[in-house]
């Protein structure tokens, strides 16, 4: 939108008697407030919005996975996965699959676990918090890459309780 078009819009709104007009387009947001019938007070706010490109479309029969940040995957479960239990992060921090770099991972896909087994650790404020399983079952999928940041309530593992 050009400056001339914005000026014409302001004049039009002032003449129309409207007290407030909001206009949002792809890359610009305009709010025009007038003093009502008094015609003295006229305020215009123009805000440039960042251009957001639409996400690329995927055509697959597999679960849809979109990269939001490095190491963080958003998974839309298929019908088969609805009977699985999702283990979610109880805290914000950094996800680690093993206690130290030279140690094996706590769990791998296909491992059978029981309630109380350590699944991973999440580092928060220099403290390593062990995340234990609340159910018994089989690890179906690890949803987070090792050494990736995690948010509260973010899915970490899929477990088949059967």
Image (cartoon, helix red, strand yellow):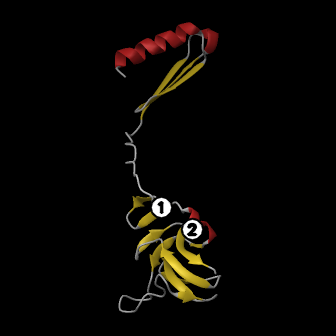
Which quadrant of the structure image shows residue 33? top right
Position of 121 with respect to 134 (left or right) is: left
Verify CB contact (< 8 Å) between mark 1 and mark 2. Answer: yes
What kind of element bears circle 1?
loop
Q: Position of residue 37 (x, y in %)?
A: 63, 9
The residue that mark 2 highlights is 81
| Position above or below: 101 against 60 | below
The single residue placed furthest to the bottom in the displayed view is 103
Residue 24 shows in the view: yes
Residue at the (41%, 18%) spot, across then down: 6
What kind of element bears circle 2?
helix
78 or 132: which is nearer to us? 78
- Characterize the local packing of mark 1: few (<14), some (14-19) or many (20 or more) Cα atoms within 10 angstroms: few
Which quadrant of the structure image shows residue 1? top left
> From the image, which quarter does the C terminus lie in?
bottom right
Q: Position of residue 87 (x, y in %)?
A: 58, 74
The residue that mark 1 highlights is 63
């Amino acid at each position: 939108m050009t400056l001339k078009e914005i000026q014409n819009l302001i004049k039009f709104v002032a003449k129309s008697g409207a007290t407030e007009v909001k206009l949002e387009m792809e890359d610009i947001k305009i709010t025009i407030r007038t003093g009502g019938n008094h015609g003295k007070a006229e305020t215009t706010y123009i805000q440039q919005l960042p251009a957001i490109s639409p996400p690329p479309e995927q055509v697959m029969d597999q679960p849809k996975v979109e990269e939001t940040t490095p190491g963080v995957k958003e998974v839309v479960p298929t019908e088969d996965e609805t009977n699985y239990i999702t283990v979610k992060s109880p805290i914000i921090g950094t996800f680690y699959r093993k206690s130290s770099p030279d140690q094996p991972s706590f769990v791998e896909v296909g491992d059978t676990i029981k309630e109380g087994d350590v699944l991973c650790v999440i580092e928060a404020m220099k403290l390593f918090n062990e995340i234990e399983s609340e159910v018994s079952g089989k690890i179906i999928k690890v949803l987070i890459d090792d050494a990736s940041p995690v948010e509260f309530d973010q899915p970490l593992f899929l477990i088949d309780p059967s």
